[in-house]
């Protein structure tokens, strides 16, 4: 798939390119007009000069004793001439010329009006009924330089405009897309726990309908999830009573049957029923955890909650759990006490069930609200480890189970904004399994840690 191109880049390049082309077009147009006007101004100056000199030349030549002799006009001061001129008769004989005038640059025969040669612009005029001609020459490079400079002056701003336009579009698009970015963040922040409609102020009109559609979708998703959850919770709840009743019946049956194969079968059925009861209990825990409400209103001290659960388990597991508490008196976090109990029971149950029976289970809580549950036992391969928190995923163990314990733990952890990490082998060991849960420390009104 082609990677999506950036709107910012496309608009920046497109607008700058368009502006540059338009500017170039306008420059060419303006330059043609300027060149035309310049030529007109230069031509009119040339014509004016010829018309001024001609009567003087006529006067001078007719006053001469020997008019047929070419004459240089004496200069008052040596200088380089810009305009040069030639006065000739109808046959082309030179009667008078300016001191720098080079006859080669003029037309062979005197002509009237404007004409252009390779390097000069010429203007000719006549007097005395076509017997005297004046021709005046102006070098073209002066005009060309003026035209060139006009062109540069028009092109120069473009050098500054290109980067300014690129930067301007980039910035403008960035600012305009701010609300879209905020919207994206809001969408990303939504999860199973939060499917509330997304409201972002001042979305562009093009995006707004999309936002409406997304909210609609979120609403449908929320309803579907709610239906699924309540179905699971209700089913598990409805199963509870008949399961308990059947279990009691089968227990009585087992006691009443004499020793023999029938009793073994009754015991097997009893076991299966217990497992079924455990599964329905886990399903209920999961449904409850996914329903939200995992955060407590007031921060809870985790230490007594932890001590209580560990105590409970130690009674039934012959003191296999070693508890390590922080030196500080209390560690506060905003988690519902029941949810914390469910989380902890699932983790400890796993550690006792899958950990090496001859090694203790280490449960510890740090003053930074980091909970660790460590047990011995064989290492779990990384690919398996990664998937253990998914529902109904189990490692390759003989022990019975549903594959829901870690999924429940993960749901609770996510619901309270904590983080869960599994490691195998346990850090600092060659074997074993470690579960870490980093809770968020509750802060008091001043943003400081709450100390007990
Ligand atoms: N403390 C542990 N030590 C070793 N393996 C574990 C531990 N906790 C969980 N596991 C592995 O993760 C799998 C999933 O655990 P869980 O979700 O609680 O489901 P269940 O316990 O019902 O199998 C277990 O089957 C086991 O293979
Ligand atoms: Mg389990």
Image (tube, rainbow, N blue to C red):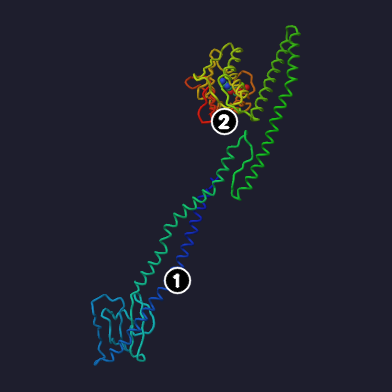
SS assignment at label 1: helix
> Where 35 sits versus 169, above or below?
below
Residue 417 is tagged as: 2
**Residue occupying the far bottom of the picture:** 65
- Residue 137, percent from left and from top: 33, 79
For the point 48% across and 56% down, which residue is it? 16
Rendering quarter of residue 91: bottom left
Image quadrant containing the N terminus: top right
- Residue 52, percent from left and from top: 34, 84
For the point 50% across and 23% down, which residue is it? 367
Looking at the picture, tell me which residue is in the foreground, 65 or 448. 448
* Residue identifier under label 1: 33
For the point 39% across and 80% down, which residue is it? 114
Looking at the picture, tell me which residue is in the foreground, 86 or 44. 44
Looking at the picture, tell me which residue is in the foreground, 173 or 271. 173
In the picture, measured across the screen, residue 13 lies left or right of residue 125, that is: right
SS assignment at label 2: loop
Q: Kindly indicate whether the residue at mark 2 contacts the one at mark 1 (C-beta within 8 angstroms).
A: no
- Residue 332, percent from left and from top: 55, 24
Label 2 environment density (alpha carbons within 10 Å; few <14, some 14–19, many ≥20): some
């Amino acid at each position: 798939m082609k990677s999506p191109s950036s709107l910012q880049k496309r608009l920046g390049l497109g607008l700058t390119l368009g502006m540059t082309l338009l500017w170039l077009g306008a420059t060419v147009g303006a330059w043609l007009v300027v060149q035309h006007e310049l030529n007109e101004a230069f031509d009119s100056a040339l014509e004016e000069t010829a018309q001024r000199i001609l009567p003087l030349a006529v006067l001078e030549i007719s006053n001469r004793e020997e008019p047929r002799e070419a004459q240089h006009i004496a200069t008052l001061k040596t200088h380089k001439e810009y305009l040069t001129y030639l006065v000739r008769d109808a046959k082309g004989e030179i009667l008078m010329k300016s001191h720098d005038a080079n006859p080669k640059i003029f037309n062979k025969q005197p002509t009237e009006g404007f004409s252009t040669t390779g390097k000069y612009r010429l203007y000719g005029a006549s007097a005395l009924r076509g017997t005297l001609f004046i021709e005046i020459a102006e070098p073209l490079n002066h005009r060309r330089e003026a035209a060139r400079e006009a062109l540069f002056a028009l092109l120069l701003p473009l050098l500054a405009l290109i980067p300014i336009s690129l930067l301007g579009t980039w910035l403008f698009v960035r600012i305009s897309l701010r609300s879209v970015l905020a919207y994206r963040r809001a969408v990303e922040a939504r999860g199973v726990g939060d499917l509330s409609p997304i409201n972002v102020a001042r979305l562009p009109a093009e995006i707004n309908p999309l936002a409406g559609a997304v909210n609609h979708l979120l609403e449908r998703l929320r309803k579907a999830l709610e239906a699924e959850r309540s179905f699971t919770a209700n089913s598990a709840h409805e199963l509870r009573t008949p399961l308990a009743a059947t279990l009691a019946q089968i227990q009585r049956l087992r006691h009443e049957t004499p020793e023999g194969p029938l009793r073994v079968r009754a015991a097997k059925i009893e076991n299966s029923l217990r497992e079924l009861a455990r599964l329905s209990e886990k399903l209920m825990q999961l449904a409850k955890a996914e329903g939200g409400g995992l955060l407590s209103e007031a921060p809870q001290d985790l230490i007594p909650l932890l001590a209580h659960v560990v105590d409970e388990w130690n009674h039934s597991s012959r003191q296999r759990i070693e508890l390590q508490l922080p030196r500080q008196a209390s560690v506060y976090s905003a988690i519902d006490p029941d949810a914390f109990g469910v989380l902890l029971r699932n983790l400890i149950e796993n550690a006792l069930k899958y950990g090496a029976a001859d090694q203790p289970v280490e449960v510890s809580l740090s003053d930074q609200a980091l909970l660790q549950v460590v047990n011995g036992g064989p290492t779990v391969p990384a690919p398996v480890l990664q998937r253990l928190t998914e529902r109904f995923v189990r490692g390759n163990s003989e022990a019975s189970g549903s594959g829901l314990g870690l999924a429940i733990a993960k749901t609770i952890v996510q619901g309270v904004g904590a983080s869960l990490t599994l490691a195998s082998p346990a850090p600092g060991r060659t074997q074993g399994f470690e579960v870490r849960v980093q809770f968020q420390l509750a802060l008091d009104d001043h943003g400081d840690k709450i100390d007990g």
